[in-house]
Image (spheres, rainbow, N blue to C red):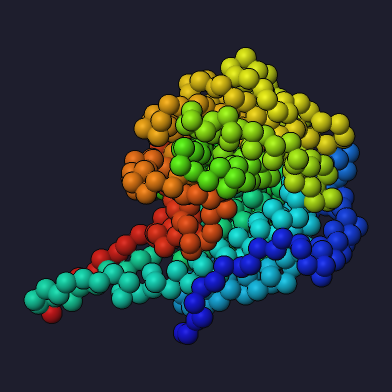
Amino acid sequence: MTLEPFKNEPILFFKDEAERRAMERALAEVKAQLGREYPLLIGDQKLTTGRWLESLDPSDPGRLVGRVAQAGPAEADAALEAAWEAFETWKRWPQEHRSRVLWKAAQIMRRRKFELAAWMVYEVGKNWVEAIADVAEAIDFLDYYGRIALNLKGPEAVPLYPYPGEDNEAFYIPLGAGVSISPWNFPVAIFTGMLAGPIAVGNTIVAKPAEDSSVVAYKVFEILAEAGLPPGVANLLPGIGEEVGAHLVAHPDTRFVTFTGSLEVGLIITETAAKRIPNQRWIKRVVTELGGKDAILVDETADLDLAAQHIVASAYGFSGQKCSAASRLIVVDEVHDLLMEKVTARSEKLVVGPAEENPDLGPVINAEQEAKVLKYIEIGKKEGQLVLGGEKLEGPGFFIAPTVFTGVDPHARVAQEEIFGPVLSTIRVGDFDEGLEVANATRYGLTGGVFSRDRERLERARYEFHVGNLYFNRKITGALVGVQPFGGFNLSGTDSKAGGPDYLHHFVQMKSVTERF
């Protein structure tokens, strides 16, 4: 099989009139479809339960995006049963055939790129650029994992040394039926990547999307079906996490769990999955990505204009609702005041508004998240000096102004706890050494960045700044599939390195076979 070299799907910035018109058409078409109902997808069945999850537009919570059938424990049992039934056939498909399904799905997703982006604009409040980048990443996951899976095919994937009198080989086999529990903040990219990796190498999956993004998850499943994915290989099971998610994690038939979300929930999943219960025949494998308290360190040699530009992009992209977002800014005293003038000047120009209008920042996801962010802003007012924002903005949506605190102690709550909103806490340090120490003084270790022109300092940070994804002189968000494998250290998760060559190893096991001559 001959393949062109992998190339990331381009991200659009809507500077071209044709791109803008295409997005406007997609928004109009999707808007006309708002308010519909969507079933569960279990095996070859479309099921409703009499219970519904309502997905609301965070820019206008009075607008219903759609109603999705809500699963419970009985539907979870049925989905796992369907997944195991499909596994018996799917695991025997030649790898090239499985990969072609993913590539076909990627091609369909390219065709429906603007439509999927428009669904995210309405369902999770992403602006146009953030939404189209989300779709591009999902396309990359499908394309890339289909390719990487070929490297795990057959005995040639495991080179062994010869031994006299024996024929020895080793090869990878899939684990079985697993569970994917994904977040709302990348409802196409992360949702797609978390299920595409396992199924690429022959597993089957029960996918539980976040309650706030289950409609666009259904749209992804439409694409998988059109691409020829057999029924039961992936099963769509929206529901309340504490009910259906917890049931799936504890179930004896769950072979593996992959989760992206909060630290607290991730630790509960890890603990639950570690407990063997009756009729469970394996140790469940758990893959987690659990967020961060990410820092950018700026020293006195840095290009401050460049730093300010990328700090603002890192802190406020998608209203800070990214696990990789910059929430701590660590600045050497010598340039602190000048940098903060530049950061504040850029931040106060940001436009906040309804996502369909393509502002710089849309809303936060829901009323609960809005209350959480506003609570941390009140905490920050006691722990630092509020120099920008710090308020809920007018309008029906969950709009919060870009917020900047200075004079924050490294151990303050707003400098240690994940807020997941448009809040940046600034910490002044005496020199680079102190800054690096402060950067590492957190229980997380996902992303980080350094702005400096000092090569010796950059090389030191390369090995001593303890995060899974480190960036020099650029923003700390926007990891690209196949370019920057993504995953963090410490309590940021299991460092799964999504979008990297090792990711699929989480979902296979090696079997060794020896035959005596």
Q: Considering depth in this image, is 308 or 477 the residue closer to the camera?
A: 308
Q: Which residue is drawn at 65% across and 29% down?
A: 404
| Residue sticking out furthest to the bottom | 2
Quarter-wise, where is residue 500 in the image?
A: bottom left
| Residue sticking out furthest to the left | 164
Q: Where is residue 165 in the image (x, y as percent from the top left)?
A: 9, 77
Position of the C terminus by quadrant: bottom left
Residue 17 lies, with reference to residue 492, above or below; the image says: below
Position of 58 with respect to 228 (left or right) is right
Q: Residue at x 62, y 40 (%)?
A: 315
Q: Residue at x 21, y 71 (%)?
A: 160
Q: Residue at x 50, y 81 (%)?
A: 3
Kindly tell me whether residue 112 is visible in this rendering.
yes
Kindly tell me whether residue 253 is visible in this rendering.
no
Quarter-wise, where is residue 168 in the image?
A: bottom left
Q: Where is residue 124 in the image (x, y as percent from the top left)?
A: 74, 46
Q: Position of residue 435 (x, y in %)?
A: 42, 32
Residue 471 lies, with reference to residue 110, above or below; the image says: above
Q: Where is residue 486 in the image (x, y as percent from the top left)?
A: 48, 52
Residue 75 lies, with reference to residue 106, above or below; the image says: above
